[in-house]
Each structure stands twice: as structure tokens, then as C-alpha cells.
Amino acid sequence: MNVTTHDVLAGVGPRLHALRQARNISLAALAAETGLTASTLSRLENGKLRPTLEQLLPLARAHGVPLDELVAAPPTGDPRIHLRPVRRSGFTVVPLTRRPGGIQAYKVIYPPAGKSATTTLQTHEGYEWFYVLNGHVRLVLGDQEYRLGPGEAAEFDTRIPHRIGSADSHAAELLTLFSAQGERAHLSPALTSPA
């Protein structure tokens, strides 16, 4: 399939719009994050303005996606997933899947206990599952507290107030699955606290 530059750039607007809608933020809020005007963002999303690298870089950072995802660069035929760690409020998230929509897999590394930004419980729509790879995890779920070690897994409805973090002075590594709602709640660039 021969994909032209015009075809690639024509798809940027709808992807930008979908990313902003998925984060449930306004053009004004995105403008404040990126330094671009709301008018420029609107014209980019509507395809009335051809995107430049100077516009795409801050948008990729704000949405927490790689630049090639914004422009949907033609596939190279390489099936490997190139891991790009993202830091959010003291913890590190490594995307392990790359297909849009549905359940996504991540490796999450929580810093040693006491090093995270907050101890606030979160709630959001969705469902979460995780498996402890290394270290020990403290899961607060409602008024219950659990300590999980390597090889243990947990799953729960994320409408229950919850918090996950390292249980001791060592980092904890988890393999986790997020629904689309959980992904937005945990990975939004505006996030101020880990779950």
C-alpha cells in the first residue's frame, strides 16, 4: 500500500481530536498545556491547518504518546514493540501493547514507599488487574489493606477508592492491565497522584 505524505497528514487531525476527547479536556486546557492557541488546536483537529513538527512535539508530550502515533507513520513490518517509559507522579509506566482501544498492558514501577507524590485514594470508572513481578506492593482498596509479593495478582473494580504503591524501601514492579477508563485515570499527563 502506497501511503502519501498527504494521506499521513490528513489523519493527524482526527487522531488529535480523539486523543483530546479520550482525556476529556477542552481546547483551552490543552492550549495551556502545550503553549499553542486554542484556535490553532481547533484548526489542526479539523484539518484546516497542516501540522508542523513544532506543533506536534508539544501535543505528543501533552497526550503522552510517541510522535509516530500522532502521524500514524506507515508500519515498517517490524512486529516488536519499542518500549518507551513514561514517568507520572513519581512512578514509571512502560506500555507493552500498542493497539488502540480496549484493554492495554503496562509494566508499572512504583518507587520505594514514602517516595510517591501523595497517598490520596482514587476512584474512576473501569476495572484493573495487576501481577507483582518484583518487590512488595501495598494495595489499599476501600477500608481494606493488602500486601502482595512476587507472583501474586489482584483484580478489582476501580469505582472502589484505591491506591497502589511499594510496600517497603524497595521499588515494586507490576504487570498491569487497564481498561480505557483506567488508562485515562492513571496515565493522563495532568495526573498529580499515582493510583
Image: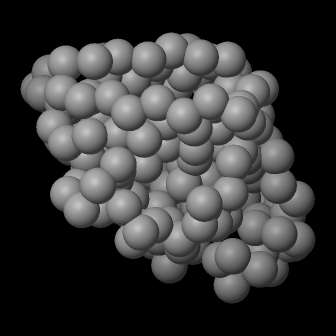
Tell me where residue 112 appears, x and y as whole percent.
29, 62
Tell me where residue 185 appears, x and y as whole percent.
66, 43
Tell me where residue 194 appears, x and y as whole percent.
54, 54
Taking 90 as reference, is 69 above or below it? above
Residue 18 appearing in the image? no
Q: Who is closer to the viewer here, 178 or 168?
A: 168
In the image, taking residue 173 as reference, residue 182 lies left or right, namely right
In the image, taking residue 101 as reference, residue 152 lies left or right, namely left
Taking 33 as reference, is 120 above or below it? above
Q: Who is closer to the viewer here, 144 or 66?
A: 144
Indicate the quadrant where residue 40 lies: bottom right
Q: Residue at x 54, y 22 (%)?
A: 128
Tell me where residue 84 appears, x and y as whole percent.
26, 51
Is the image coloured rainbow, by chain, by secondary structure, or in one colour? one colour
Q: Residue at x 51, y 15 (%)?
A: 155
Residue extending farthest to the bottom is 35
- The mark tally for this picture is 0
Q: Residue at x 64, y 37 (%)?
A: 162
Placement of the N terminus among the 4 image quadrants = top left
Residue 145 appearing in the image? yes
In the image, taking residue 109 as reference, residue 118 lies left or right, namely right
Taking 171 as reference, is 97 above or below it? above
Q: Residue at x 59, y 17 (%)?
A: 156
Q: Who is closer to the viewer here, 86 or 60?
A: 86
